[in-house]
Image: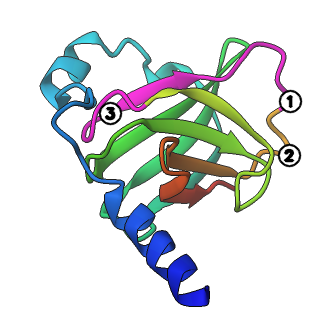
Amino acid sequence: MKSLFTLLLFISLISCKKEMVDPSPTSATNQLTTETFDPSKATLLKQGTLAGINHTASGAVKLYDADGTKVVYFETFTSQDGPDLKVYLSKDINATEYIRLGVLKSTSGMQSYNVPANTDTTPYKFVHIWCERFTVVFARAEIK
C-alpha cells in the first residue's frame, strides 16, 4: 500500500508539466506590451526572491501600494511552464490560507497582479506559483 501511494505521488509530481491540450501562459513579448503597472509610482511594502520548488523559477517578487491598490509585481521573472498555473498570496508557507490573484500571465518578464480591494496584506507573507490541477507548488517567495 505504501509503495502504491509513493508511486501515485511520484506520478502526480511529474505530471504537472506542459501538455499540448492545456492553454499555457502568454509569451513574455505579449505580456510586456500590455503591462501598465509602474513601480516607480508606487510604495514598496514587501519583497522577496522567488525560488523554484522541484521546478525551475526565479526572480524578484514585490508587493506595492499604488494609491490604495495593492499589487504583487514580478520582476526579472522566469519560470518553467506547466498547466493550470496560478499566482497565490498566502499567509503560510503551505498556502493553506491564500488569495488567488489570477492565472500566471507569462513564464517570463515583468508582470503584475492586483490584490482584491480592502485586503489587509500584513499577514500575507508568501507569493506562490501554484499548479492547481495537480495541487503542486512550482515556486515560492517569502516577502518581508
Q: Earlier in the sequence, mark 3 or mark 1?
A: 3
Q: Which residues are magenta?
A: 104-120
Q: Secondary structure at mark 2?
A: loop
**Residue that carries the numbered disc 1 in the rendered image:** 120
The amino acid at mark 3 is Met
Residue 51 appearing in the image: yes
Q: Any magenta on residue 113?
A: yes
What secondary structure is marked by label 3?
loop
The residue identified by callout 2 is 123
Q: In this image, 43 relative to 85: left or right?
A: right
Compared to residue 47, the image places residue 26 above or below, namely above
- What residue is drawn where x is 27% and y is 40%? 107
Residue at label 3? 110
Spatial CA distance of label 2 from label 3 is 25 Å
Q: Residue at x 52, y 37 (%)?
A: 87
* Residue 138 drawn at (x, y percent): 44, 57
Q: Name the foreground residue: 5 vs 14.
A: 5
Where is the C terminus found, in terms of image quarters? bottom right
* Near-viewer residue (102 or 1): 1
Residue 137 horizontal/vertical position (percent) = 52, 57
Q: Nearer the viewer, residue 99 or 62?
A: 99
Q: Are marks 2 and 1 in contact (CB under 8 Å)?
A: yes
The correct choice, above or below, for 112 with respect to 135 in the image is above
The residue type indicated by label 1 comes to: Asp
Front in this rendered view, residue 75 or 116: 116
In percent of width and height, residue 93 lies at 71, 62
Q: Could you tell whether 3 is left or right of 79 in the image?
A: right
Task: Place residue 11 in its image quadrant.
Answer: bottom left
Disc 2 marks a residue whose amino acid type is Pro
